[in-house]
Amino acid sequence: MLKHISDRRDGSIGRVTGEAGLIDYAAEKCDLTEFPHTLLREETLRRLFLGRNRMETLPDNINRLISLEELYVYANRLEQLPESLCELTRLRILDLSHQGLTRLPSNIGALKQLEILYCSNARLTHLPESLWSLNNLIYLNLTDNLLDHLPEDIGNLASLRELRLYNNRFHKLPDDLCDLSNLRELHLKGNQLAALPDQLGNLESLEVLDLRSNRIGRIPDSIGNLRQLIHLDLRANRFTSLPDSIATLPNLRKLDLRWTRFRDEPAWLKNLEERGCAIYR
């Protein structure tokens, strides 16, 4: 798993000046009802922590924060965002999660330096086309939304290492998802997937694949090409057999098969256990 931000500043307001005069400012869980407008004069502001407040809007002139690299406004009351947010072209981390967001700015693809985007626990029903042009994105979290469709353009996110899409409404996955050759973790539990792309085995860097609580009736044979796979979670699906190619995965350490119904348990499961793979039935 990628290392995520952990230095939260709950209940206190602080301002730190660092190298080259760049500023970090934190006011998390401080009961703020609006954005601190005095910050808009801070052109050297680099990291801004305003999570766990009660803000309903961000200012249209937030684009004045020309040095901003990290913005944390999670767990507020934002429903929409100003398009001017996407003029902060130095942003690398953007945390918008845990609030009632109904849409992302249409020009979010202008954030060419963005590496990490959190937008979980929101009310998104669709995603802007420009999102798929974020070539430097390595982590994308869209869990716990109302999404039911992924475009083929998701295959353009060539740098992506971790993709979290669980607890949405996806019925199928686009074939081009399997073009993400740098992807290490794919989290899809709690959707309505009935099938997986036959090209699944093209995800040659994948280490974690979580498919729990879907409606999958067949696992493609190509899964045996995931030579880096360590953790495979297949709980609560509808398949009645497994491809023998799973037995050849050299790095598999955990295989979760609980709440599935096999016609016959494959003999090679015992071989996997004997070599040290933990199997949960």
Image: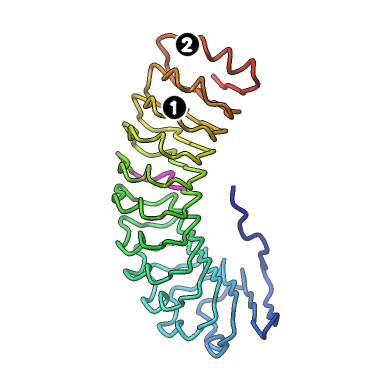
Task: State left or right for residue 117 relative to residue 254.
Answer: left
Secondary structure mostly seen in magenta is: loop
Q: Nearer the viewer, residue 79 or 264?
A: 264
Q: Position of residue 276 (x, y in %)?
A: 65, 21
Amino acid carrying mark 2 in the image: Glu
**Magenta region: which residues?**
164-169
Give the residue pinned by disc 1.
Answer: 236
Residue 191: numbered disc: none
Work out whether 81 lies above or below 234. Answer: below
Work out whether 267 lies above or below 106. Answer: above
Give the residue pinned by disc 2.
Answer: 265
| Cα–Cα gap, marks 1 and 2 | 16 Å
Task: Give me the residue at 46% from left, 82% from top.
Answer: 62
Work out whether 39 lies above or below 215. Answer: below
Residue 9 quadrant: bottom right
Compare marks 1 and 2 and give the one earlier in the sequence: 1
Q: Position of residue 92 (x, y in %)?
A: 52, 68
For residue 167: magenta? yes
Which numbered mark, 1 or 2, is in the foreground of this view?
A: 2
Residue 174 quadrant: top left
Task: Give me the residue at 49% from left, 73% from top.
Answer: 55
Task: State left or right for residue 130 relative to residue 180.
Answer: left
Q: Position of residue 12 (x, y in %)?
A: 69, 73
Task: Give me the residue at 54% from left, 19% from top.
Answer: 281
Amino acid carrying mark 1 in the image: Ala
Q: Nearer the viewer, residue 208 or 191?
A: 208
For residue 127: magenta? no
> For numbered disc 1, what is the local secondary structure?
loop
Residue 221 quadrant: top left
Q: Position of residue 181 (x, y in %)?
A: 44, 45
